[in-house]
Amino acid sequence: MLMGLKDKRQVEKNKSFFQSVRHAIAGICRLILEERNFRFDLIISAVVLILGFIFKINLNDWLWLFAAFFAVIGSEVLNTIVENVVDLIVGPHYNDLAKRAKDIGAGGVLLSALFATIIGCLIFIPRIVSLIK
Ligand SMILES: Nc1ncnc2c1ncn2[C@@H]1O[C@H](COP(=O)(O)OP(=O)(O)OP(=O)(O)O)[C@@H](O)[C@H]1O
């Protein structure tokens, strides 16, 4: 009980590799439970994964899909960090620099989503077209 409480309010460095991993997993759980956009990205990724199996795409296409997937996830993680740090600093007050930082973070996510959409279209549209023909 005391250990758990101590762990919850820990501010010093992690003492072991397993403690680092435990905190990293807690971070991933937070992303899934608290970030709607992150959940949306995971659902889209699952759909694309299923499409990849259905169309039997090749290794090169899989590599591009994973690159796109991690680009979106990575930018979503960075955006969430920016949002949290900005909220920590300015709190619930309007601030021009806060708006600037959050809008730029959101812009990064949008750009990576655009990159992922282009990759998805380049991989799947020709296959869907040849299926229809
Ligand atoms: N403290 C602030 N000062 C000025 N503008 C702000 C502030 N907080 C939020 N905003 C504006 O509101 C927008 C949304 O805020 P925030 O990113 O916190 O919400 P969100 O719903 O978590 O966003 P997302 O859809 O990216 O998850 C920001 O992009 C920014 O334009």
Image (cartoon, rainbow, N blue to C red):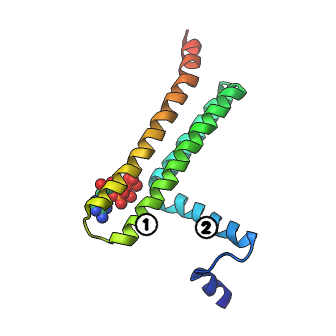
Residue closer to the observer: 75 or 13: 13
Front of the two marks 2 and 1: 1
Residue 12 location, quadrant: bottom right
Q: Is residue 129 left or right of residue 97?
A: right
Residue drawn at x 65%, y 91% as measured from the top left = 2
The residue most toward the right is 17
Mark 2: which secondary structure? helix
Q: Earlier in the sequence, mark 2 or mark 1?
A: 2
Residue closer to the observer: 103 or 69: 103
Q: What's the residue type where badge 1 is placed?
A: Val
Q: Which percent across, then down, holds residue 116?
A: 52, 35
Which corner quadrant of the figure contains ligand 1? bottom left
Q: What's the residue type where badge 2 is placed?
A: Ala
Q: Which residue is mark 1?
A: 85
Look at the image and tell me whether residue 119 can be seen: yes
Q: Which percent across, then down, holds residue 18?
A: 74, 70
Q: Is residue 84 left or right of residue 73?
A: left
- Please say if 71 is above or below 100: above
Mark 1: which secondary structure? helix
Residue drawn at x 55%, y 48% as measured from the top left = 73
Asked if the residue under mark 1 is in contact with the one under mark 2, i.e. CB atoms within 8 Å, the reply is no
Crowding near the residue tagged with mark 2, few <14, some 14–19, many ≥20 C-alpha atoms within 10 Å: few
Q: Which percent across, then down, holds residue 77?
A: 52, 55
Look at the image and tell me whether residue 1 can be seen: no
Residue 15 location, quadrant: bottom right
Residue drawn at x 63%, y 38% as measured from the top left = 66
- Please say if 57 is above or below 7: above
Q: Which residue is mark 2?
A: 26
Dot label at residue 114 = none
